[in-house]
Image: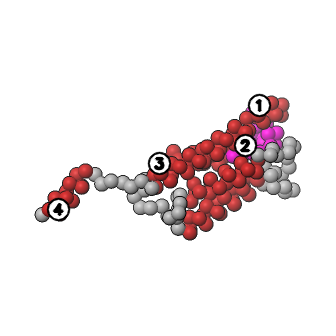
Amino acid sequence: MRRWPARRWWVALATALFTVVFIAIPTDLIDTPFFSREIPPTVWSWPVLTLSAVLAGLVTATYVAHPEGASFGRAAGRAGMAGWLVTFFAVGCPVCNKLVLLALGTTGAMQFFEPVQPYLAAASIVLLGWALYARMTRENSCRLPARADAEAEALDRVH
């Protein structure tokens, strides 16, 4: 990361700020007249959101100005997106989320979904952390030329 160009750092910062605003407003961590919350946020909501936002910013920055020849798999991108989405459910109000209410009802949301939210928070951080690790390790690995190409180059040098 020390070798990242400034453009990557700006993308990481912008994505982290976007993530905080995009998740904190509908989950009413940032109070607005548009959304309300029936149950106060937990003490770990802001730290989880902040850490997830930073990780999401760093993962997104790996897509900008990556070195030539670096190969990336789709799994890391999917894990990063899943981690970003799980963060929304982890810090949100259990009875304010319409999807949870439709699936479980108010009582089910309080009895089943609320106790699961800390695990969702941990899962979001793990998914984003794994996505960052996977993208960074692949970026820093170099591709070796095929053996036939290397042998042909060696023969050209000899002749």
Disc 2 or 3, which lies upstream in sequence? 3
Circle 3 sits on which residue? Answer: 73
Q: Residue 155, image x and y in percent?
A: 16, 58
Q: For residue 156, which numbered disc appears in the image?
A: 4
Quarter of image, res 53: bottom right
Q: Earlier in the sequence, mark 1 or mark 2?
A: 2
- CA–CA distance between discs 2 and 3? 27 Å
Give the side of residue 69 with respect to residue 91, left or right: left
Q: What's the magenta region? A: 87-103
Q: Residues within 10 Å of mark 4 (few under 14, many from 20)?
A: few
Mark 3 lies on a secondary structure that is: loop
Check disc 1 and report its element: helix, strand or loop: helix
* Mark 1 neighbour density, 10 Å: few (under 14) some (14–19) many (20 or more): few
Residue under the image location 22 percent in, 51 percent down: 148
Say which residue label 2 marks.
90
Query: Which mark lies nearer to you, 1 or 4?
Result: 4
